[in-house]
Image (cartoon, rainbow, N blue to C red):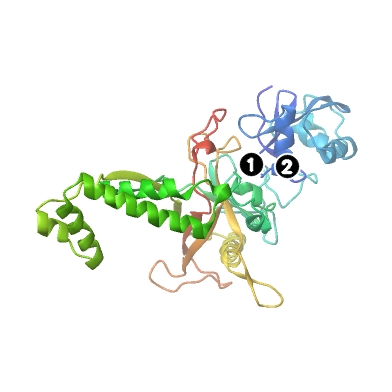
């Protein structure tokens, strides 16, 4: 049997590959579950987890599935129905009132069965509160898309307890997705730009000699006495300066320090020379990446206009600063996880991955056509939305895992 199309069970997205039920990262998997699956050997390179082998109704071999899934598969008929139907009904005909042999191969049943608010690929078509806000509505789910989930960035006292600089993934500080999951079509101009900060730096021979003297005078850090160390450094600098005077033309040294004292280039004026700067390009640190997106939303029906309004409102609300009840402090706005999802499920293998982002700028043009026009319900006939996302953490070399088979960051 070929790999099935994605389907939803409970709060996760799944595929059935041969007889193995796999949870896919198309709907985010909690990091704790991913870590446990990796330790047990059930985590796949594409980020999916082998949950169970299904050989028929009631005939299961559990692999990396958590207890909640095991219990649901045993007690909830819709779980087996979804799995069985994703295969075209090859496991058994007993599907609690739904005869999968009477359905076209590949037809997917939502949970609960025949949910009118989900299309065959489990995207929401509801105009009220829903798990997925998708534009355009008539996208049948068989295409690549940009998936955006919203998360709370959990800060703690790690900074004060010495844990701040431990190697952590930004995802470790994210809550489970909050609110709606947004699915937007792929746009032209997808790109990423990775950069690091390098800059020119100088260390002339006089500075080098003095720095070596100061370094040697400080002594072991475990025995560091700031007052004593300061006295030792001053003494070492005097000795180093005396050594320079003995080994170099006194006029040059005097001119150099005279220029330093008055902030002028006395050295070159007096000697006609320049001191060797020992110029070198040094690494200064990583830089953060920014991603810009622009979408033209044109509602073609009342249901779609309501979804567009929800999408715009969702971004505006969750990028805003949050107040607590007292009003003394402000909480960090929510952050967003952006994923280019491949039509077969999971991270697109040939597009870049993106770390969690802050939405730093959000602009809506309600009259992009140059005139004010609405439908009878008041919805604008068109909107242009521009978004700027900035990653909250830089990219490091160890973010590229040798076991990954994707583009990386």
Q: Is residue 102 above or below residue 121?
A: above
| Residue at 50%, 60% in the rendered image | 227
Q: Which residue is mark 2?
A: 32
Q: Is residue 141 above or below residue 365?
A: above
Give whichever of 14, 126 is nearer the camera: 14
Instruction: Tell me if label 1 and label 2 are in contact, CB under 8 Å.
Output: no
Q: Earlier in the sequence, mark 1 or mark 2?
A: 1
| 349 left or right, relative to 11 | left
Residue 288 point in image, percent of width and height: 46, 52
> Would residue 108 be seen by someone viewing this image from the given angle?
no
Secondary element under disc 2, as helix, strand or loop, is: helix
- What is the count of numbered marks? 2
Residue 89 point in image, percent of width and height: 77, 28
Q: Which residue is mark 1?
A: 26
Residue 96 quadrant: top right
Q: Residues within 10 Å of mark 2 (few under 14, many from 20)?
A: few
Residue 109 point in image, percent of width and height: 75, 40
| Residue at 19%, 64% in the rendered image | 264
């Amino acid at each position: 049997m070929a790999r099935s199309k994605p389907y939803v069970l409970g709060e996760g997205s799944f595929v059935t590959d041969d007889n193995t039920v796999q949870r896919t990262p198309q709907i985010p998997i909690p990091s704790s579950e991913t870590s446990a699956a990796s330790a047990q050997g059930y985590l796949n390179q594409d980020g999916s987890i082998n949950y169970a082998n299904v050989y028929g109704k009631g005939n299961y071999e559990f692999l990396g599935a958590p207890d909640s899934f095991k219990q649901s598969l045993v007690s909830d008929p819709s779980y087996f129905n979804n799995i069985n139907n994703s295969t075209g009904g090859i496991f058994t005909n007993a599907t609690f009132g739904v005869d999968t042999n009477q359905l076209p191969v590949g037809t997917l049943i939502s949970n609960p069965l025949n949910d009118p608010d989900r299309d065959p690929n489990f995207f929401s078509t509801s105009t009220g509160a829903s798990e997925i806000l998708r534009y355009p509505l008539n996208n049948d789910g068989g295409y690549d898309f940009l998936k955006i989930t919203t998360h709370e960035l959990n800060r703690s006292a790690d900074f004060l307890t010495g844990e701040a600089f431990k190697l952590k993934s930004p995802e470790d500080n994210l809550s489970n997705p909050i609110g709606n999951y947004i699915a937007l079509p792929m746009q032209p101009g997808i790109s990423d730009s990775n950069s690091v900060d390098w800059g020119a730096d100088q260390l002339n021979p006089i500075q080098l000699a003095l720095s070596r003297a100061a370094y040697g005078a400080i002594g072991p850090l475990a025995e560091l006495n700031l007052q004593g160390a300061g006295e030792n450094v001053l003494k070492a600098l005097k000795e180093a300066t005396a050594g320079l005077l003995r080994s170099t033309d006194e006029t040059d040294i005097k001119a150099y320090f005279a220029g330093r004292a008055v902030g002028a280039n006395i050295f070159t004026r007096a000697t006609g020379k320049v001191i060797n700067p020992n110029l070198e390009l040094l690494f200064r640190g990583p830089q953060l990446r920014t991603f810009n997106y622009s979408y033209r939303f044109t509602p073609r029906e009342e249901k779609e206009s309501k979804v567009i309004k929800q999408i715009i409102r969702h971004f505006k609300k969750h990028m805003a600063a949050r107040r607590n009840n007292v009003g003394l402090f402000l909480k960090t706005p929510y952050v967003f996880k952006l994923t280019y999802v491949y039509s077969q499920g999971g991270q697109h293998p040939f597009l870049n991955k993106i770390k969690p982002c802050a939405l730093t700028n959000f602009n809506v043009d309600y009259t992009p056509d140059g005139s004010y026009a609405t439908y009878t319900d008041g919805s604008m006939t068109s909107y242009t939305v521009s978004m700027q996302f900035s990653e909250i953490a830089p990219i490091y070399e160890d973010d590229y895992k040798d076991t990954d088979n994707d583009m990386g960051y």
